[in-house]
């Protein structure tokens, strides 16, 4: 299946996002809700037996997907804990924080709990628009999580390829170039790309089945 | 299963909505996206073989759920057509209209096509905050659809009980009082009610399974 996929470069991924918002009139709250839900459902498909989930959330939209994912994971019966090292002043992010607080999901500034106490780690640190280098305290968190050998599920792209080696990734909208040689479990979410855009950009997005919000590519 | 359900009156349903927005900080775009998605998934569960779907959308949030549902139905392979008789000036609704237009979903002001050409009708005219009487042109549309005997799927509450007799209903958040003696297919969606609210209000919401966004109650 992977061989027929078209992988997106950073510029094209950014343009697709802009088109969804500016040309098709979507609100970021809508697409983030769908992306975070698809992520939580893919995590459930990947590790239904896991209980404690650590979510590492960055200050941008990838982190926002992580907050939404945490809410849905709690609905599915998981115990999520969020580590959110760098607070964003963005109103969207403040809202997402408030929702998780209302749902009594712990939100911490730093990695204070033993990593061994978590069954899995969801990496929502950086998305496709991230440009290196990684700054502290993110570098230290990534090194600690990597050393802990907890299974990592990355949202959209693994943060700081190749230092982070996730066991699973969900690509959102369409897979990005960095996923071309990925060997782990690979999901796709973001079932909201208008047919017109798929055709115009020849995106060749893999086929979702039924009313599912994610598809397992490998 | 139905016997243990607690059915909500109009005032309590309104208060729950207010709490979700004001106390828990949800944005209407987020919860409407989840409600519309759950509705589309329940429609898919109910009539996977249907092709042409007519969605009747009112000017309020129930109509908004209908617009979101239409988008997801198109993603699932249906051909949706929206009838939206009374245009809202609300920015939220304008955005939902623009998204459906971008996805080339036909939006009409009145019932112009033969009702017989549609396999099913989704009733997204009025929600739980509606207060009678029904004004024109809604009354006429309801009478025509009722006379056509097309199978009707209502969102949250059947518009104008008892004149509308849907074959299926999706209750959102929790079932409303008018559903107590409903005999058709009954779904529940809106898997976003915080545990704290469920406990405080003793909502006794039926149990969702796995990562599903709806549950079939009967």
Image (cartoon, coloured by chain):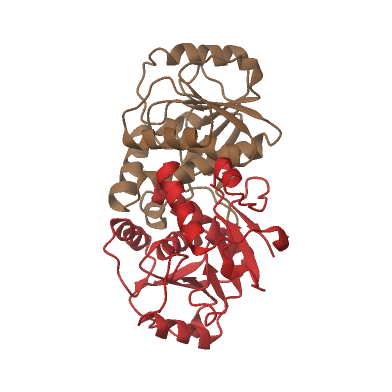
Chain colours: A red, B brown
- In this rendering, position of residue B39 left or right of residue A101: right
- Viewport quadrant of the C terminus of chain B: top right
Look at the picture and state if A134 lies above or below B73. below
- The answer, for residue B99, to whether it is visible in the render is yes
User: Image point 43% across, 71% down: which residue?
Assistant: A125
- In this rendering, position of residue B80 left or right of residue A60: right
Q: Which residue occupies the extreme bottom position in the image? A: A147
x and y, in percent, of residue A210 in the image: 67, 45
Q: Nearer the viewer, residue B178 or B150?
A: B150
User: Image point 31% across, 28% down: which residue?
Assistant: B89
Q: Quadrant of residue B119?
A: top right
x and y, in percent, of residue B79 in the image: 62, 31
- The answer, for residue B173, to whether it is visible in the render is no
x and y, in percent, of residue A95 in the image: 32, 56
Q: Which residue occupies the extreme left position in the image? A: A89
Q: How many marks?
A: 0
């Amino acid at each position: 299946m992977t061989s027929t996929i078209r992988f997106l470069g950073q510029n094209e991924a950014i343009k697709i996002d802009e088109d969804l918002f500016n040309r098709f009139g979507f609100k970021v709250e809508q697409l983030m809700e769908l992306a975070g839900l698809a992520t939580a459902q893919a995590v459930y498909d990947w590790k239904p037996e896991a209980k404690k989930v650590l979510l590492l959330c960055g200050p941008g939209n990838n982190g926002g997907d992580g907050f939404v994912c945490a809410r849905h994971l709690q609905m599915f019966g998981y115990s999520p804990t969020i580590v959110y090292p760098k607070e964003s002043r963005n109103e969207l992010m403040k809202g997402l924080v408030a929702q998780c607080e209302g749902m009594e999901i712990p939100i911490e500034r730093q990695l204070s709990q033993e990593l061994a106490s978590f069954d899995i780690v969801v990496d929502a640190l950086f998305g496709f628009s991230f440009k290196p280098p990684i700054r502290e305290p993110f570098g230290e968190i990534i090194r600690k999580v990597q050393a802990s050998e907890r299974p990592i599920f990355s949202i959209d792209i693994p943060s700081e390829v190749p230092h982070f080696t996730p066991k699973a990734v969900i690509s959102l909208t369409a897979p990005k170039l960095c996923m071309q040689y990925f060997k782990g479990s690979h999901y796709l979410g973001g079932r909201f790309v208008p047919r017109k855009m798929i055709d115009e950009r020849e995106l060749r997005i893999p086929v979702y089945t039924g009313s599912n919000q994610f598809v397992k590519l490998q």
